[in-house]
Image (tube, helix red, strand yellow):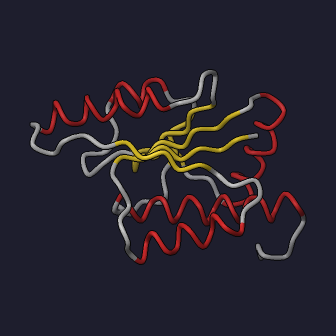
Amino acid sequence: MQINIIAVGRLKDSPEKELCERYLTRMHPNPVIKEVEERRNLEDEVLIKREGELIMASCSPNSKIIAMDETGIHWNSQELASKILNAQQNTKTIDFLIGGHNGLSKNILDKADTILALGRFTWPHMMARVMILEQLYRAQKIIAGHPYHRK
């Protein structure tokens, strides 16, 4: 099964990029990070709509869409692992969607199979990539029965 992280913005050389690369090298198979970017000189409403169009165009056909939004549900690491394990039987691709500084458009949230939150805090969208990758790595280890995750 393929897992994609579709995110607004380009991750330049930074500590966040180093952490993303660290988790990507540990994971097999590796999730694919697809970056989309729109010019920032647009009004917020136009920008979020355009970003949403670019994100949806990057989604895989018939994928399970998990939109990351602070209003979403909360899973723990074991629940995420269980959802991924179950999805492996029903779908070929899971797309995790991360919006830009304005978040995701209502259109994307309406189309998502699941809206997932990374807790109640608001996180910078570049940090959200690292957090999702760590949780995906953890989920792989839980599924494999590896002791990385401790209850």
Q: Nearer the viewer, residue 103 or 17?
A: 17
Residue 100 is situated, as x and y percent measured from the top left of the image, at: 30, 48
The structure residue drawn at horizontal position 90% and vertical position 65%, both measured from the top left corner, is 145
Q: Which quarter of the rendering shows the C terminus?
A: bottom right
Number of numbered labels in the structure image: 0
Residue at 69% across, 63% down: 137
Lateral position of residue 27 relative to residue 32, left or right: right
- Residue 89 lies, with reference to residue 74, above or below; the image says above
Outermost residue, right direction?
145
Q: Is residue 17 above or below residue 88?
A: below
Which image quarter: residue 122? bottom left
Rendered residue at 44%/26% (across/down):
57
Residue at 51%, 29% in the rendered image: 112
State the image coordinates of residue 142 (x, y, percent, origin top left): 81, 63
x, y percentage for residue 84?
Answer: 74, 45
112 is higher (above) or lower (below) than 78:
above
The relative height of residue 68 versus residue 151 in the rendered view (above or below) is above
Horizontally, is 38 left or right of 35 in the view?
A: left
**142 relative position to 25: left or right:** right
Q: Position of residue 60 (x, y in %)?
A: 58, 28
Q: Quick one: 125 or 70, which is closer to the camera?
A: 125
The N terminus: image quadrant: top right
